[in-house]
Image (cartoon, rainbow, N blue to C red):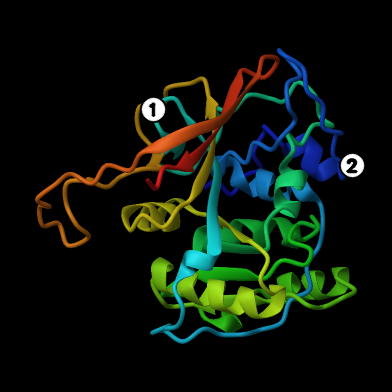
Amino acid sequence: MSSSSARLFAARVFAGQSRASKTRTSKARASRESVSVSATRRAALLAGGASLATALAPIPAAASGAGAADLQTVVYVGLTIDGFLARPDGALDFLPTPSDPNEDFGFADFLASVDVVMMGRKTFDQVAAFVNDGVPWPYAGKPVYVVSRTMRQEDIPPETLAAARASDENKETKISVSAASPAETLRVVARETRKKKGSRPLRAYVDGGSIVRALLEEDLVDEMVLTTVPVLIGRGAPLFGFDARTNANGASKNVSEDLRWDVAESTRYENDGLVKTRYVRRRR
């Protein structure tokens, strides 16, 4: 979660180049899906290169409503071999420089596949910082929900709102700040998204280490796309961090409730040393 741009995608983001077309080969240029290295998210989130209109719509602190069963929750992040998103101070200096500055690793395609975005405050602040530097808002047509107990609607930077509103002709999307828990916010997201999208399947992109960990602990994540950077950094901001043998209160469970996943797809980016794997939650 660094304040400096992530080297892995900096060239692609700031050049504003169009995303590379998707190809499939058996080796170096295998399927070109996205590599949202979560600790690299400040650049990766912006790899879509689109924009978003913003309308304020606060969520009550004690959200209630339908469950999130109607919404498929997708985590799309990257991490080191030892499971860290960034160094303890947020630095991302361990990331490789991309071999192809035109390559977005399919992030634009991934972003197009989701209906709504949910993130923590640190992630939002990172994106807002990019917007302040002149980078386009990335979430065209996507409602964005920021989960934070310290942020208010009026804390959204004016330049972020202005850039977002100016870049979306339809003006159908919004930035909403939620003081509710990630799980409660997800229920609101499901309910509000369902109202607008009808009965078709819905997908929510969830980002931010603490948000992801909270949803994983409550078994509210349906899919994870994890891109591994071949490096060990020893300490840092972890993606994972809960014990399947205890509940949210720390009390021991009678039976360990390990979360099992099926490997749906794996892609090796030989030129960049990255391996991306898509996992689907096994619920049977």
Q: Position of residue 214 (x, y in %)?
A: 36, 58
Which is more toward the observer, 158 or 136?
136
Q: Specify whether 70 is left or right of 13.
A: left
218 in relation to 173, above or below = above
182 in relation to 105, above or below = below
Quadrant of the frame with the C terminus: top left
Residue under the image location 66 percent in, 62 percent down: 128
Q: Which residue is mark 1?
A: 82
Q: Position of residue 175 (x, y in %)?
A: 65, 75
Identity, as a three-letter code, of the amino acid under mark 1: Asp
How many callouts does the rendering have?
2
- The answer, for residue 184, to whether it is visible in the render is yes
Q: Are marks 2 and 1 in contact (CB under 8 Å)?
A: no
Closer to the N terminus: mark 2 or mark 1?
A: 2
Q: CA distance from mark 2 to mark 1?
A: 33 Å
The quarter of the picture where residue 204 lies is bottom right
Identity, as a three-letter code, of the amino acid under mark 2: Ser
The quarter of the picture where residue 43 lies is top right
- The answer, for residue 156, to whether it is visible in the render is no
